[in-house]
Amino acid sequence: MTNNTPRGTPTPRGTPTPADSNPRLEPDLRALELQLDQLALAERDSAPRSLILAVEASGPDAADAPIPIQFVSRRSRWSVVHAALAAGVLVAATLGVVWLATGGRGSTDPRPLQTPGGGVAVTTPSHAPASQDAMLDAIVAVIAMENDSLASEIDRLLSETVRLADGLEASYETPGLEG
Amino acid sequence: MLRSASAGDESAWRWLVRRYAGRVYALAKSRCGSADVADEIVQSVFATAAVKLRAGEYAERGRFEPWLFRVTMNRLRDEMRRVRRQATPTDPIAMRDLSLASPDARPGHAELSSLDRLRRALHELSPQDREIIELRHHGGLSFNQLSELLDEPLGTLLARHHRALKKLQAILSPHGRDRADEEHDS
């Protein structure tokens, strides 16, 4: 360690020492000074261990480490939680609207039906109308403004759902009846 | 040690962090009254130090502590400006901090420990008086380092420190506030 203390300076005050006290102080003020040093030590000791470890891990040698350090503050965490909750409510509300608009449970599922002639027919599930797609896109866009990664995750889940629905539809189709 | 830390010596960097992070944290927490904001300031200050050391831009030979605390004070000023701009905080943690700072939320005199009383008395000092006390005790700077940091003569700083302690003592006395005001007026 290089000597950071200018010449003539008393002991550096990393740890308080009476030797580095203000020479003008009366005994009662000196006692107050010691109390302040105790308070300062208590504040230093209250530094979270996780914080010190995070700072230690972000040294100059941390190759291309993103700075500021990879540490999400509690305030930021609250923002993420709020964004996630808002997104969850929006998605639930949208699904509810879609469910109601399509007439309730099961009405969109393809169902094999017995025809009067004895053959089997398949009811064609109607795809969500364009207005519903537009609504979903709008919701994803709103979420994207709050949180990119959350929006892309929701987008991916919606795509998965559509693919699953298409798969179900295909499985209900009976090739023999076409044409 | 600084040279070793700049060269990528992990143990040197850890030594610097352990030596100074607690002091930066104590100063930040005392000045802004929030542990979360103090967390962020410590990270920001050491991120700046890491960048400067890595880039070889730290040129304050032999004056690392005043430099580090100057960076800290600048971050604190930025943070206080930001808080002032946000007139109505909606963040629950910020609301909690606000309620703690409110005089109505203060517990009775007898309920507080001596350190709590001291902490609260500090917040009744003027910003200038608090600055010198917090830099000196929470930051742990010597008067020479303070002189360098604040660009004021040593004698002036000793007098400022003495005056600030007198006011703090007056606030802590049974008729605290009135006596402190009288001393301030005189």
Image (spheres, grey):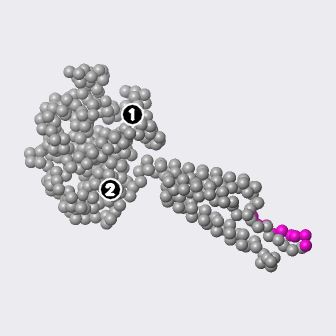
* Chain ID, mark 2: A
Q: Amino acid at mark 2?
A: Val
Helix, strand or loop status at disc 2: helix
Q: Which residue is mark 1?
A: B101
Subunit under mark 1: B
Please give left or right for residue A43 compared with residue A151 in the image: left
Q: Position of residue A59 (x, y in %)?
A: 29, 60
Decide: few, some or many residues near mark 1? Use Cα within 10 Å; few <14, some 14-19, many ≥20: some
Disc 1/disc 2 C-alpha distance (Å): 29 Å
Count of labels in the image: 2
Residue extent of the magenta highlight: A109-117
Q: Is residue B185 above or below residue A35?
A: above
Q: Is A112 within the magenta?
A: yes
Residue at 24% across / 34% down in the picture?
B128
Q: Nearer the viewer, residue B162 or B82?
A: B82
**What residue is shown with label 2?**
A55
Which of the pair B70/A128 is nearer the observer?
A128
Residue B106 x, y percent position in the rendering: 40, 30
Q: Residue furthest right?
A: A117
* Residue A35 seen in the current view: no
Q: Left or right of A127: which side holds A57? A: left
Q: Residue at x 69, y 61 (%)?
A: A128
Question: In this view, which residue lies farthest toward the bottom?
Answer: A176
Residue A157 appears in which quarter of the rendering?
A: bottom right
Which residue of the protein is positioned furthest toward the front in this rendering? A130
Q: Position of residue A7 (x, y in %)?
A: 9, 48
